[in-house]
DNA sequence: GACGCCACGC
DNA sequence: GACGTACGTGGCGTCG
């Protein structure tokens, strides 16, 4: 879960200053506050592991509160010069820690923090506010804790709502009432004379707020107290107002931009040196050296000196291994390691090495196979892949590089980003340092294998790893390398045609708008629609007016410009993403070679990049025509597409053993009609088109785990109606309802849910107190086993197809996988025979309580496949 | 370069 | 009753 730290910059500086004796460095700069600050930051970073971080400062002298009350913060003692000179270095310190800073004229740090913590609360982040000012405790909530630094800086009280309740018997939001009554000397807030903490708490216990107390003055005991409250009622109200943190500061950034990354270690080191922070420098040195493992392998001059099980690694910095050749080879058996630039090696020696090994472990088989192809080596013998293992152990962990995976096994090596640099700092390392890096990398790959396999066994996923994901990686490697042929001339033609139409629509739109503007800019379009043409605002986004399709559709009868905009949108998307985008992806061989990501989608699905061939248009004919550009290898071949019919719902029927649903699939009734019959309690003949449409949407919702809100959006109905649909659905399929309940229980008990093949997905938010986070977690728990099992099944089919001797008799080639669909290139004269083979493989990939049904179509291009 | 909006598929 | 609501990739505009 994301964790946001907000520091009240000034108050913490004060605390640090007064908490430590005066120190200074050789050049005479006082450093005690800076040092205290640094220690606090160190502690927070280690203990809390924040993902987002901000230090807010008070800006100038005047704030909106001074306008309300001139004496605000009056009488406050001046900042001592010994502290004043440390404020600028503190800002530098914050910068080198990679922490964002912010201040805004007219507002205090409190208000910035209040605005952000409220925002963070809504977005479901956990927030910690660090301050030396008790005022901020009013911000405590279920997700926001205030760390109040008492004397010095290491002594911290943690203000949660429960702590405040215990301390004062108040809710966090009543802190301002407390201040209203008792005032605050340090901020020169008057309060009511004669009222201190005790009296204020007593009054608030009975009347809850300043206003409550003032309304019930007659019930207040004590003559003087009553008099003072009457006389100073305005002061009380104003004091409360002054103490109230303003939560709507016009902040011009998102919490996302506060992402915390310690990426300035060198600058930090320099600053510590300058400030003479010896202990912190030592810490940094220690982190640098002690953490990094020293491997005790020995470099050898020949691959043949390696014996037993080995780990193998081809290195190239570039992401796309299909177009970039490897530059270095590293291989190890754990004691002997071989490292060489590839230009000093013969392909044949590498191939000999690979084919003579019993067991070869790598990080990312598919990538290694792709890189080997540059050396004309087609080797399929890898039998261990720690990247795939890491993904299975926890799919939510981002797969970044070897260092990231190895760190989970207490092996710390330099990350790729660190070694190669990022962005402008990118370097091309060579020589001994680079070889040392590669040595650590291949050793880390090697060392991780054994413990990882143990974890996989412990979690019952070793089989999934060894017999599904690893073989699949090899199938995918072949598909990526093979590519799919694209007829560029068809795209060029479409481009001209669409451009002409776009130009026409564009002039029409400009004419109707009365001016020209960038239609692709939601900002400019919003201005035209909602300010110039005064159309009603349906929806707003964080940054302005929403101009999304559903909004435009609602405006359709309000102005004729809308239909042109909608058409423009459709065509512009086709043109930029597909017609032009795809042309740029065609390689020398007239093919497009997508890459599949096997370790990204949480459910176990694949994804596809550069380009994404899993989202080529199909629903609208205009877009579907893009598919005409995808063609078989020659005129004697066809493209064949086979897709599982309703695979997720069949999986659901199997997992839940719901009789009604099993019957529907066994008797081959249309499942949406059947669902409508059950949900609306009507006979088959009486199912209207609308009923079926609604039933289909509910089924869709079940499969994708959408909420009642999502369903209401899909169907254009109210959330309440959507909820009724879902409730009726669950009552019609009682075993499904029971499953949904029990899977949530499973998730709570185990912390994860799993697919039929034991693929896990951890659901930490299932325990969240945040309704949103928890609801989402529950839907994830319900949906992941279904979608994940469907993903497992098609993967099984792909691996089974790859193994099938019978299928090998045909010259059919697997080209693409699109979640529930496989696309092949097949010789025309083999297609019917091949279909019967591949259908059997797909339909029998797994045995369920309902049949798996595979539909198919083939044609002379992808568009003709229907 | 990062982020937001929008749109495409399953 | 509020909350902000399937996943993924990519193009474009905007801002720094």
Image: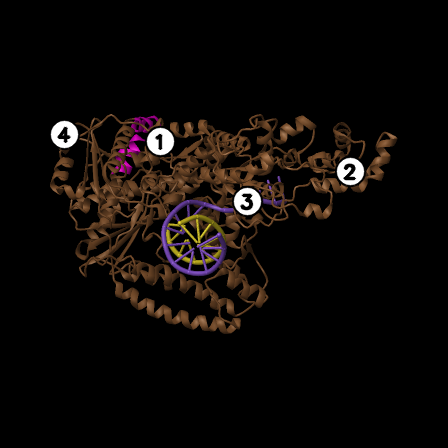
Chain colours: A brown, B yellow, C purple
Q: Nearer the viewer, mark 2 or mark 1?
A: 1
Q: Which residues are magenta?
A: A451-470
The chain carrying label 1 is A
Q: Percent position (x, y) of residue A350?
A: 15, 39
Residue at x 69% of width, y 31% of height = A170
Q: Nearer the viewer, mark 2 or mark 4?
A: 4
Q: Percent position (x, y) of residue A194?
A: 81, 31
Q: Which mark is residue A212?
A: 2
Residue at x 57% of width, y 63% of height = A530
Gap between marks 1 and 3 measured at Cα? 33 Å
Residue in front for this viewpoint, A263 or A233: A263
Helix, strand or loop under label 2: helix
Gap between marks 4 and 1 measured at Cα? 28 Å
Pick out the residue farthest to the front: A27
10 Å neighbourhood of mark 3: few (<14), some, or many (≥20)? some
The chain carrying label 2 is A
Q: Earlier in the sequence, mark 3 or mark 2?
A: 3
Helix, strand or loop under label 4: helix
The chain carrying label 3 is A
């Amino acid at each position: 879960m994301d964790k946001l730290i907000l520091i009240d910059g000034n108050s913490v500086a004060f605390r640090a200053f007064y908490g430590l004796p005066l120190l200074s460095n050789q050049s005479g700069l006082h450093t005690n506050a800076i040092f205290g600050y640094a220690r606090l930051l160190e502690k927070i970073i280690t203990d809390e592991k924040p993902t987002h971080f901000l230090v807010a400062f008070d800006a100038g002298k005047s704030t909106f509160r001074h306008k309300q009350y001139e004496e605000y913060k009056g009488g406050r003692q001046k900042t001592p010069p010994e502290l004043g000179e440390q404020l600028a270095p503190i800002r530098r310190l914050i910068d080198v820690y990679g922490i964002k800073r912010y201040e805004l004229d007219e507002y205090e740090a409190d208000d910035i923090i209040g605005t952000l913590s409220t925002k963070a609360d809504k977005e479901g982040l956990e927030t910690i506010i660090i301050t030396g000012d008790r005022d901020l405790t009013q911000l405590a909530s279920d997700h926001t804790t205030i760390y109040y630094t008492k004397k010095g800086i290491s002594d911290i009280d943690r203000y949660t709502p429960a702590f405040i309740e215990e301390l004062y018997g108040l809710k966090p939001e009543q802190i301002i009432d407390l201040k209203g009554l008792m005032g605050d000397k340090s901020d020169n807030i008057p309060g009511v004379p004669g009222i201190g903490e005790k009296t204020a708490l007593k009054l608030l216990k009975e009347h809850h707020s300043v206003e409550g107390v003032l309304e019930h003055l007659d019930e207040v005991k004590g003559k003087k107290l009553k008099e003072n409250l009457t006389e100073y009622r305005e002061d009380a109200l104003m004091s409360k107002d002054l103490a109230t943190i303003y939560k709507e500061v016009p902040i011009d950034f998102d919490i996302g931009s506060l992402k915390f990354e310690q990426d300035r270690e060198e600058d930090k080191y320099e600053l510590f040196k300058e400030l003479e922070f010896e202990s912190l420098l030592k810490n940094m040195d220690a982190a640098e050296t002690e953490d990094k493992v020293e491997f005790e392998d020995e470099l050898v001059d020949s691959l043949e000196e390696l014996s037993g099980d080995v780990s193998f690694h081809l290195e190239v910095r570039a992401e796309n291994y299909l177009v970039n050749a490897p530059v270095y080879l590293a291989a190890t058996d754990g004691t002997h390691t071989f490292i060489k630039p590839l230009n000093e090696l013969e392909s044949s020696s590498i191939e000999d090495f690979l084919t003579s090994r019993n067991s070869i472990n790598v990080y990312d088989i598919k990538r290694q196979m792709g890189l080997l192809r540059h050396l004309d080596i087609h080797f399929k013998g890898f039998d261990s892949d720690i990247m795939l293992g890491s993904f299975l152990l926890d799919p939510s962990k981002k797969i970044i590089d070897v260092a990231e995976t190895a760190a989970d096994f207490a092996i710390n090596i330099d990350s790729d980003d660190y070694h190669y640099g990022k962005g402008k700092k990118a370097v091309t390392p060579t020589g001994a340092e680079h070889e040392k890096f590669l040595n650590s990398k291949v050793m880390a790959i090697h060392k991780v294998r054994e413990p990882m396999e143990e974890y996989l066994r412990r979690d019952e996923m070793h089989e999934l790893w060894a017999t599904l994901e690893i073989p699949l990686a090899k199938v995918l490697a072949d598909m990526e390398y093979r590519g799919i042929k694209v007829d560029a001339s068809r795209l060029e033609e479409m481009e001209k045609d669409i451009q002409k139409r776009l130009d026409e629509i564009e002039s029409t739109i400009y004419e109707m708008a009365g001016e020209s503007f960038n239609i692709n800019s939601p900002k400019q379009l919003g201005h035209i629609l909602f300010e110039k043409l005064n159309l009603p605002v349906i929806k707003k986004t964080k940054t302005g007016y929403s101009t999304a399709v559903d909004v435009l559709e609602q405006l359709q009868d309000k102005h004729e410009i809308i239909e042109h905009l909608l058409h423009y949108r459709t065509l512009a998307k086709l043109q930029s993403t597909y017609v032009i985008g795809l042309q740029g992806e065609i390689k020398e061989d007239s093919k497009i070679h997508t890459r599949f990501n096997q370790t990204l989608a949480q459910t176990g699905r694949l994804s596809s990049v550069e380009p994404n061939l899993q989202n080529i248009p199909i629903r609208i004919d205009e877009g579907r025509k893009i598919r005409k550009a995808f063609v078989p290898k020659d005129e004697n071949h066809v493209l064949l597409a086979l897709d599982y019919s309703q695979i997720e719902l069949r999986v659901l029927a199997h997992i839940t053993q719901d009789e009604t649903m099993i019957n529907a699939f066994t008797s081959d009734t249309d499942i949406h009609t059947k669902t409508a019959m059950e949900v609306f309690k009507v006979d088959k003949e009486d199912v209207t088109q609308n009923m079926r449409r609604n039933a289909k949407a509910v089924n869709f919702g079940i499969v994708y785990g959408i909420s009642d809100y999502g369903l209401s959006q899909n169907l254009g109905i109210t959330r309440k109606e959507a909820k009724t649909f879902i409730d009726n659905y669950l009552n019609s399929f009682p075993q499904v309802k029971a499953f949904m309940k029990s899977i949530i229980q499973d998730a709570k008990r185990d912390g994860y849910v799993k697919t039929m093949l034991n693929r896990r997905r951890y659901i930490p938010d299932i325990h969240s107190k945040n309704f949103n986070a928890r609801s989402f977690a529950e839907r994830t728990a319900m949906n992941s086993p279904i979608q994940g099992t469907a993903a497992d099944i098609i993967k099984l089919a792909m691996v089974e197809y790859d193994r099938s001797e019978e299928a090998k008799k045909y010259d059919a080639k697997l080209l693409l996988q699109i979640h529930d669909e496989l696309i092949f290139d097949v010789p025309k004269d083999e297609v019917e025979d091949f279909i019967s083979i591949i259908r059997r493989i797909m339909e029998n990939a797994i045995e369920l309580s309902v049949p798996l049904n595979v539909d198919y179509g083939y044609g002379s291009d992808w568009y003709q496949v229907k």
